[in-house]
Image (tube, rainbow, N blue to C red):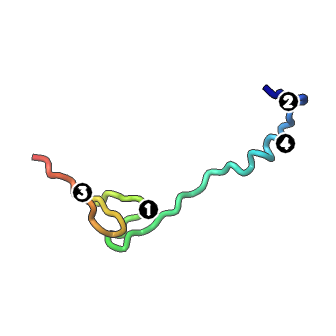
């Protein structure tokens, strides 16, 4: 295995790590329900699962 000949400085290490950043997720507002949700994701609203503004699944009633 390769081993470094010299210790890498903190400055050099931090320069490499500057590109690793947390990104803010893009949020969309549904035109049908007005509910904010992540793009390309289904979401629950009032017991119904919506995707692209359409009901995909309804939650079963508990007896």
Q: Earlier in the sequence, mark 1 or mark 4?
A: 4
Q: Residue at x 38, y 69 (%)?
A: 30
Res 11 → quadrant: top right
Q: Residues within 10 Å of mark 1 (few under 14, many from 20)?
A: few
* Pointer 1 with pointer 2, Cβ within 8 A: no
Determine the secondary structure under disc 3: loop
Q: Mark 1 sits on what residue? A: 40
Nearer to the camera, 50 or 36: 50
Residue under the image location 46 percent in, 63 percent down: 39
Residue 10, horizontal then vertical, whole percent: 83, 38
Q: Residues within 10 Å of mark 2 (few under 14, many from 20)?
A: few
Label 1: state its secondary structure. Answer: loop
Q: Quadrant of the N terminus?
A: top right
**Cα–Cα gap, marks 4 and 2:** 14 Å
Of labels 4 and 2, earlier in sequence is: 2
Q: CA distance from mark 1 to mark 4?
A: 38 Å
With respect to residue 5, does 12 lie above or below? below
Q: Position of residue 12 (x, y in %)?
A: 84, 42
Residue 12 shows which numbered tag? 4
Residue 4 is marked as 2
Real-space CA distance between mark 3 and mark 1, rounded to the nearest whole angstrom: 19 Å
């Amino acid at each position: 295995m390769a081993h470094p000949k010299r210790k890498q400085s903190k400055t050099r290490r931090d320069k490499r790590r500057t590109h690793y950043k947390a990104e803010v997720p893009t949020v969309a507002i549904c035109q049908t329900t007005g509910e904010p949700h992540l793009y390309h994701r289904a979401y629950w609203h009032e017991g119904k699962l919506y995707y692209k503004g359409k009901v995909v699944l309804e939650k079963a009633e508990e007896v």
